[in-house]
Amino acid sequence: MSDFSQNDGKGGAWAARPFEYTARDTLFSALTAAVARFGRHGRGQWEDMKPARYSYGDLLKITLALGRLCQKVTQPGEHVGVLMPNMTATVGLLIGLSAYGRVPCMMNYTAGTDGMQNACHAAGIKTIITSREFLKKANIESEVSALDQVSVIFLEDLRPRFSLADKLWLMGFALWFPERAVPRGDPEAPAVVLFTSGSEGKAKGVVLSHRALLANVAQILASVRIDRNDAIFNCLPIFHSLGLTAGTLLPMVSGARLMLYVSPLHFKVIPELLREKGSTILFGTSTFLHHYAQHGRPEDFRNLRFVVAGAEKLAEPVRKVWQEQFGIEIMEGYGATEAAPVISVNLPDAKCQGSVGRLLPGIEARVIPVPGINEGGELHVRGPNIMSGYYRYDAPRRLEPPHSAAGAGWHNTGDVVNVDAQGYVHIAGRLKRFAKVAGEMISLEVVENIARAVSAEAMHAATCVADVSRGESIILFTTDSDLTREQLTSAARGMGYPEIAVPRKIKVVESLPLLGTGKVDYMALKQFGTA
């Protein structure tokens, strides 16, 4: 794993070992390279909830066909919304659009009409490609029909437009000479636009190049062995950066088998499928892993050799139950959509409990002090996997390249971290998730940790509201109806935290609101807190 060198501790840089980027130029050329390496007609490489299994040759065929079909209804350079579930056809649609010079924008179908409309505005999306069958099953027909100034095209209507000439082109030429069948790709061109979760405000469009996505795949493969002997289970949506890069592109490049599942919320079904499919690798959030542990049995997880938690802090009770009940040590990682997304991860032979691991090869980090926070600072990162820039709602389709206090090309993660002498990154919390109480900066994640120490089985989330006398007051939302401030105060003392970190108010809820990515919807909680 990478070595780090700390040079000053106050805004200094930690540099990973040199990273030699060897990934292919574009998503399409990465697919054709995988076809050449692993063969067209091997065992069923990919599965989804349809009865069929798909080989690399099948995926190439789907990609070429959908790319050619979409060429008929879109323009070169157009930003096209993709509103589809986790399916092999969705992957083919994404890669096919980008192969023909379109920019697929992966729509979060759990965001509601307003969230999708905001995404369309920020990225300049005028056309959305989806499926009637999907909209009906997901029960979002009304949300999509309410979108304004957007043309919705259904795959069911496109299929009849694949003419005899198209079929002859596909079977007689494109499948045999795929690189000559599509325009020459540019590794720096946008490969996809993803949208931030919007957990703390309006979602932004994150423009990721082919180079950024494939660099992140190569960085992961430089750190951990994943090959044809592995079977990856991906229930994280492809509109989620971890679901796209680690859950979809990684198996495509590495030769690992892939099971694409439609939703991470089917807590009873997923453990059974993990057993049935012999899955060896699982990516999830702490929240999702908590629920899988509640509904799974040891035999469901017996084949798993690598379970990675990301997107939110791994709760200690979740780590403990997987270790004690299933003998599986969850490897906590850390990332950001803007980094395509993986920045660091613990590994079986290089781990530090309580950290999110060391930086992946090729990623530089700079920690910049924050007034009011005495330990650590705000994490800024740079590397080949960093985004091309943002599309913001207030400046649609105007690319804002990455830039931070560390300089051009750097991304400010907004997270407060410490990096220890061995290079392990420890997250204190998001800067936006600190409350200034009576002049002191209090991490809301610390508040949640105190609650978990008292009530490990329940779910907890902290937010803050303005308070005339104290600056801000902390509110804890919990599913534990018996939790008291006295219990929290006692736990805080035992853990060495000041009493000021104990929330002033406790609000009991039946469940915490979640975004489609599995993160807690803190914007919704903040509204509950002020209601």
Image (cartoon, grey):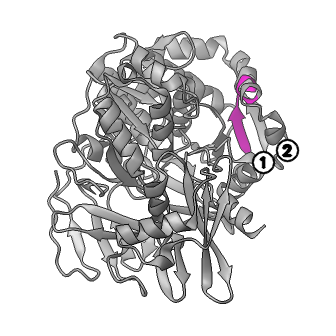
Residue at 27% x, 83% y: name it.
Answer: 10
Q: Nearer the viewer, residue 101 or 16?
A: 16
Residue at 72% x, 49% y: name it.
Answer: 116
In screen coordinates, is 209 left or right of 167? left
Q: Secondary structure at mark 2?
A: loop
Please tell me whether residue 113 belongs to the stretch shown in magenta: no
Q: Which residue is mark 1?
A: 113
Q: Nearer the viewer, residue 15 or 316?
A: 316
- Residue type of the residue flagged with mark 1: Thr
Cβ–Cβ under 8 Å for marks 2 and 1: yes
Q: Residue 233: where, in percent of width, then height?
A: 42, 28
Q: Nearer the viewer, residue 71 or 61?
A: 61
Please tell me whether residue 130 belongs to the stretch shown in magenta: yes
Q: Which residue is mark 2?
A: 146
Residue 226 appears in the rendering: yes
Q: Residue 45: where, in percent of width, then height?
A: 39, 17
Q: Secondary structure at mark 1?
A: helix
**How many numbered marks, from 0 up?**
2
Q: Magenta segment range?
A: 127-135
Q: Quadrant of residue 151?
A: top right
